[in-house]
Image (cartoon, rainbow, N blue to C red):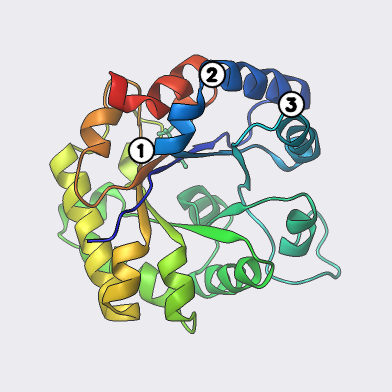
Amino acid sequence: MAERKPLISGNWKMHHNHFEAIQMVQSLSYQLNADDYNVCDVSVHPPFTDLRSIQTVLESDHIPISLGAQHCHQEEKGAYTGEVSAGMLQKLNVKLVIVGHSERREIFGESNAQINSKVKAIFKHGMTPILCVGETIEEREEGEAETKVRTQLEEGLQDIGRERIGAMVVAYEPIWAIGTGATATPEDAQNMCAHVRESIKSIAGNGSAETIRIQYGGSVKPVNAAELMNQRDIDGALVGGAALEAESFARIIQYRLH
Ligand code: 13P
C-alpha cells in the first residue's frame, strides 16, 4: 500500500486581515517543530488580500508551511471583475488551491462543470487542487450521499489525466458538519473516504486511488483530530474554525501526540 503523508490544511474563509494573518502564522510556526513537518504536510489558506504578506513571512523565515488559496477563476485573464486567476496565484508561490468548497457551490452557485475548469487551470499552473465534495443532511437521510459524492468526483475530474488525479487532494466535507460542531463519526467519515477512494479507482485506476490524499473536513478540533486521522482512508484534514487560532491548529497538526 502506498505511503501517503498526511496533509492538514487551514481554510480561514473570510477571517483575518493581513496583520492578523501574519501574527497567526508566526505564532503557529513557533509552536511547530521539525518533527511535525516530517510527519505531516501543513498548508494555510488565507483570504486573497493576505497572500503576499504570508508568502513573505513563510519564505523569509524558511517556514515549511505551504501557501494555499481558497478559490480561483478558471480563465487566464479578462473582464471578470473581482476575480483572481490561477496564474496570479502561482506568481505568489501558492502551492494548493481549494476548489468546489460547499460554500462556493451553495452561496456562489458554482457547478461541477465550472469546478472542472478550475481544476484544469490549477494544474496548468503547476499547483495542486484540493477538490471539495460532500452531501447535505437531506441527501444523507435519503441515502443519496454516495451518489452525490460520486457525481461530484466524476464531473469535477472529467478529462484530467490519471497521474494528475493521483497527485491531487480530495476533501470530503459533509455539509451538515461544517461550522456546526457536529463532526461525522470516525466510522462515517472513514466509510465515505473509502467510497471516495473507490470512486477514484474507477475514474483513474488503482495507482491514482492509492496515492491521492483524502482529507476529512467538518468541525475538526483538537479533541477529535486523532480519531479521525487514524482512519485508514483519511489522509488529512481541512480545518475551518479551529485553524483560525495558532494553538488549536497546532494541536490538530500534532494530533499524534495527544
Ligand atoms: P469547520 O472546521 O469550521 O467546520 O469548517 C470546515 C470547512 O469548511 C473547511 O473547509
Residue 220: give x, y in percent of width and height: 35, 31
Q: How many marks?
A: 3
Compare residues 55 and 70 and report the one nearer the observer.
55
Q: Secondary structure at mark 2?
A: loop
Residue sitting at x 44%, y 18%: 248
Which numbered tag is attached to residue 17?
A: 3
25 left or right, relative to 88: left
Earlier along the polypeptide chain: callout 1 or callout 3? 3
Q: Quadrant of ligand 1?
A: top left
User: Residue 211: which quarter of the image?
Assistant: bottom left
171 left or right, relative to 223: right
Vertical arrangement, residue 212 with respect to residue 60, above or below:
below
Tell whether label 3 touches label 2 (CB within 8 Å): no
How packed is label 3: few (under 14 Cα within 10 Å), some, or many (20 or more)?
few
Vertical arrangement, residue 92 with respect to residue 37, above or below:
below
Residue sitting at x 26%, y 26%: 224
Q: Is mark 1 within 8 Å of ligand 1?
A: yes
**Is the C terminus in the top left, top right, bottom left or bottom right quadrant?**
top left
Mark 1 → mark 3, Cα distance in angstroms: 23 Å
Residue type highlighted by circle 2: Glu
Residue annotated with mark 2: 245
Mark 2 → mark 3, Cα distance in angstroms: 13 Å
Residue sitting at x 44%, y 29%: 36
Earlier along the polypeptide chain: callout 1 or callout 2? 1
Residue annotated with mark 1: 218
Question: Can residue 235 be seen at all in this image of the molecule?
Answer: yes
**Is the N terminus in the top left, top right, bottom left or bottom right quadrant?**
bottom left
Residue 65: give x, y in percent of width and height: 59, 37
Earlier along the polypeptide chain: callout 2 or callout 3? 3
How packed is label 2: few (under 14 Cα within 10 Å), some, or many (20 or more)?
some
Vertical arrangement, residue 187 with respect to residue 71, above or below:
above
